[in-house]
Image: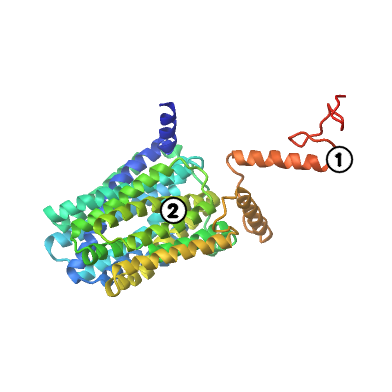
């Protein structure tokens, strides 16, 4: 019982912060509405056009601003109070959802209107995403950041369970417009949560002063650090070709398994259930590493490949459960790795690049995967993403100096970080802050280093104890002195 309580406490540690609890509740409501709108928008586009390519194009327009203007959104997050910035972006997003709902309700909606509203929503997300991602650290601090990032991912994927399920019911029982209107109302929860927060309890990071060349400065900072650059490259590959589920799942539901909106909602919900389970199972982990990220990416590619060859809908639902579970581990590990290894004044720009890599690449990958799904087959769209993910994982492991089958090497992580710090210092870039706490493995390494140093000072042939210290109470014959 005691172990269960301790495990539960560790799993939900970041909820001890009042500000984060408010944010957590608001996000749970709002993101559920966002998933409802995603299902309804995909089905609306298919109803208006019947084209998988146009569905991919609408998705591409929604994420195009993140690709183009994402770094500037990160710079705004570094300069402006993040809580106030989120109040503005959430209000605008709610207004856009209301507009789409009213157009659909009155029957005036046309495909070009969906395109325009998707593009406008993408402009909001380009600013909202880096501010929201980096605001998590201000609410909980560095110690609870990995836990909070994982719980955020759990919220997103729990919403994937609730949102599509409710959307399927509303579409069947009421109309598509109801999903958009409910989503518009859900933004009120986030706005209320942000308003009720206590600003004095935030762990505010230093804001970046206005100046020239700050965007290029952020790009140089990431380029000089392999532990940031390489995971971002992997995220770009995954975001472009593998994580196009909002495009490929509707095609899989309609053309492969000959289902309706309810089947699509069930597939999205099953993936969300798996993500919730995977997130809760890994929420206690507090020290993400690059090697863990690469191994998870490899497994992610394998489960997507399993989904691609699923012979029946029941098997596909099981594969989607596994896909969701592995994806949450991959995304949370990548997010926490980047945030913990980025300097506080650079965190907004680094997370903006995360948004560009993961979300902003959708304008490239969405039409590609949509075209493959429509003309070759939805299964082949999944196959392309699976192999791209596995190849990116193998490349990253090689670039970081890991053998694909080797066990984790914490010493390698430390050596890599030390070398990167030295290179950055020589280039006049940035120095990393000292770790917030000493890990047990660090203590073991230091003890072993002291023992090796002591051993080198002993004369040849001196008797040793098991801990490499000279044996003072016996001579070389074994007799006591």
> In the rendered structure, which disc, 2 or 1, sits on the residue that comes first in sequence?
2
What residue is pinned by disc 1?
461
Quadrant (top left, top right, bottom left, bottom right) of the N terminus: top left
Give the image location of residue 259, x and y in percent.
19, 61
* Badge number at residue 340: none
Q: Is residue 81 visible?
A: no
Q: Nearer the viewer, mark 2 or mark 1?
A: 1
Q: Residue at x 34, y 54 (%)?
A: 89
- For residue 434, which quarter of the picture? top right
Q: Is residue 315 visible?
A: yes
**Which is nearer the eye, 208 or 270?**
270
Image position of 60 with respect to 445: above or below: below
Give the image location of residue 164, x and y in percent.
24, 53
Q: Mark 2 falls on what kind of element?
A: helix
- For residue 147, which quarter of the picture? top left
Q: Mark 1 falls on what kind of element?
A: loop
**Which is nearer the eye, 191 or 281?**
281
**Which is nearer the eye, 128 or 357?**
357
């Amino acid at each position: 019982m005691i172990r269960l309580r301790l495990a539960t406490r560790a799993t939900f540690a970041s909820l001890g912060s009042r500000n984060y609890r408010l944010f957590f509740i608001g996000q749970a409501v709002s993101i559920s509405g966002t998933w409802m709108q995603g299902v309804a928008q995909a089905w609306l586009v298919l109803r208006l056009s019947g084209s998988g390519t146009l569905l991919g194009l609408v998705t591409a327009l929604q994420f195009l601003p993140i690709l183009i203007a994402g770094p500037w959104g990160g710079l705004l997050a570094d300069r402006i109070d993040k809580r106030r910035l989120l109040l503005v972006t959430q209000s605008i997003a709610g207004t856009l959802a209301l507009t789409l709902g009213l157009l659909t309700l009155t029957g005036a909606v046309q495909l070009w209107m969906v395109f325009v509203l998707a593009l406008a929503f993408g402009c909001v997300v380009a600013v909202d995403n880096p501010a929201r991602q980096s605001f998590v650290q201000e609410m909980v601090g560095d110690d609870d950041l990995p836990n909070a990032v994982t719980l955020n991912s759990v919220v997103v994927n729990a919403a994937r369970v609730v949102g599509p399920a409710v959307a399927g019911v509303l579409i069947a029982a009421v109309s598509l417009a109801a999903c958009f209107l409910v989503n518009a109302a859900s933004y009120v929860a986030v706005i209320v949560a942000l308003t009720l927060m206590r600003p004095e309890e935030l762990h505010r990071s230093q804001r970046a002063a206005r100046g020239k060349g700050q965007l290029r400065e952020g790009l140089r900072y990431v380029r000089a650090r392999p532990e940031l650059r390489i995971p971002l490259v992997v995220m770009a590959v995954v975001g472009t070709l593998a994580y196009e589920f909002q495009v490929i799942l509707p095609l899989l539901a309609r053309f492969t398994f000959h289902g309706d909106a309810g089947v699509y909602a069930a597939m999205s919900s099953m993936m969300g259930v798996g993500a919730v389970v995977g997130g809760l199972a890994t929420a206690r982990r507090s020290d993400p590493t690059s090697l863990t990220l690469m191994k998870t990416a490899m497994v992610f590619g394998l489960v997507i490949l399993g989904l691609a060859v699923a012979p029946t809908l029941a098997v596909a639902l099981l594969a989607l459960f596994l896909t969701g579970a592995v994806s949450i581990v991959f995304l949370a590990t990548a997010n926490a790795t980047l945030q913990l290894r980025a300097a506080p004044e650079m965190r907004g720009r680094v997370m903006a690049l995360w948004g560009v890599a993961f979300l902003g690449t959708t304008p490239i990958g969405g039409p590609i995967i949509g075209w493959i799904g429509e003309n070759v087959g939805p299964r082949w769209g999944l196959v392309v993403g699976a192999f791209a993910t596995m190849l990116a994982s193998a490349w990253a492991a090689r670039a970081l100096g890991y053998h694909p089958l080797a066990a984790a090497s914490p010493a390698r992580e430390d050596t890599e970080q030390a070398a990167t710090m030295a290179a950055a210092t020589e280039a006049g870039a940035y120095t990393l802050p000292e770790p917030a706490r000493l890990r047990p493995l660090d203590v073991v390494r230091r003890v072993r280093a002291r023992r090796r140093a002591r051993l080198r000072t002993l004369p040849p042939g001196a008797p040793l104890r098991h801990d490499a210290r000279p044996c003072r109470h016996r001579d070389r014959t074994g007799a006591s002195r």
